[in-house]
Structures are given as C-alpha cells and as structure tokens.
Amino acid sequence: MELLLIFIIGLLHASGIYMLLRRSMFKIIIGLILLGNGVNLLIFLLGKLTKGHPPVIEDGAKIFTEIYADPLPQALILTAIVIGFGLQSFAIILIKRVYQVLGTDDLDELNSTDEEI
C-alpha cells in the first residue's frame, strides 16, 4: 500500500510542477491543487499506515501496548485542506476578475507594459 501511495505522490508532484510552469493562470491553479493533494498524501504517509488500531486506550490499561494510528497527521491534513480551499477559491476569483478585465489568462500577454485598458 505504501509503495502505491509513493507512486501517486510522485505523480501528483510531477504533474503539479509541470502545470505550474505553464503560461495559463488556470493551469497554474490546477498545478497548485495537484501539488497540495500530493503534499497531503505525503503527510498522511509519514504518519504510518496502521489499519484497525485506533488511538484508544482499552479499559484497565494505562499506556498503548500496540502500534496505533497517529491522529496528528490526519488533523494536519484536515487543516491543510481547509486552508487549501480558501487559497484556491481566492485564486479562482482573482483569475476570473483578471480574465474579465483583460480578456486573457496568458501570463506573457499580462506581462506587457501597454496600458490600453
């Protein structure tokens, strides 16, 4: 399972960086989304995958005696998802406004100093 996740993380990072290097702002947002999902999966994988062992201490025990699922990476991922949605929605609204005003999302065309607006 970990090997499959490693391949998926590598694929998400590679495709995210490829999309970030495009000229279209819409593709840059897609790249940010892919890269963010890759980082979330990486954090999830670093917390170790343990199936069927929740972090609950049994009755009568005072410490964990078996390997348990660490809840900290999952909490970090949930926080990252919320922050990522906020960032993505802000970027989408910003790109929409730039496209409405200028009529293009090509970064090379936006880089000109001509002011005919």
Image (cartoon, rainbow, N blue to C red):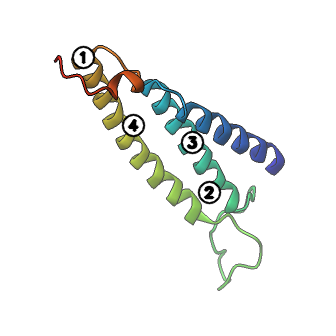
Point out which mark residue 100 bears.
Answer: 1
User: In the picture, residue 56 is in which quadrant?
Assistant: bottom right
Q: Residues within 10 Å of mark 2 (few under 14, many from 20)?
A: some
Q: Disc 2 vs disc 1: which is toward the camera?
A: 1
Q: Identify the residue position indicated by label 4 in the image.
A: 88
Q: Disc 4 vs disc 2: which is toward the camera?
A: 4
Is tag 4's residue or tag 1's residue first in the polypeptide sequence?
Answer: 4
Q: Give the percent coordinates (x, y) of residue 51.
A: 75, 55
From the viewer's side, name the closer residue of 69 and 38.
Answer: 38
Give the CA separation, mark 4 to mark 2: 20 Å
Query: What number of labels is visible?
Result: 4
Point out which mark residue 43 bears.
Answer: 2
Is tag 1's residue or tag 3's residue first in the polypeptide sequence?
Answer: 3
Q: Disc 4 vs disc 2: Cβ atoms closer than 8 Å?
A: no
Is tag 4's residue or tag 3's residue first in the polypeptide sequence?
Answer: 3
Is 68 located above or below residue 20 in the figure? Answer: below
Q: Identify the residue position indicated by label 3 in the image.
A: 35
Q: Is residue 23 left or right of residue 14?
A: left
Q: Disc 4 vs disc 1: Cβ atoms closer than 8 Å?
A: no
From the viewer's side, name the closer residue of 18 and 12.
Answer: 18
Residue placed at 17% from the left, 17% from the top? 116
> Callout 3, which amino acid?
Leu
> Callout 1, which amino acid?
Gln
Is tag 2's residue or tag 3's residue first in the polypeptide sequence?
Answer: 3
Q: Residues within 10 Å of mark 1 (few under 14, many from 20)?
A: few
Secondary element at tag 1: helix
> Callout 4, which amino acid?
Gln
Is tag 2's residue or tag 1's residue first in the polypeptide sequence?
Answer: 2
Give the CA separation, mark 2 to mark 3: 12 Å
Residue placed at 33% from the left, 25% from the top? 110
Is tag 4's residue or tag 2's residue first in the polypeptide sequence?
Answer: 2
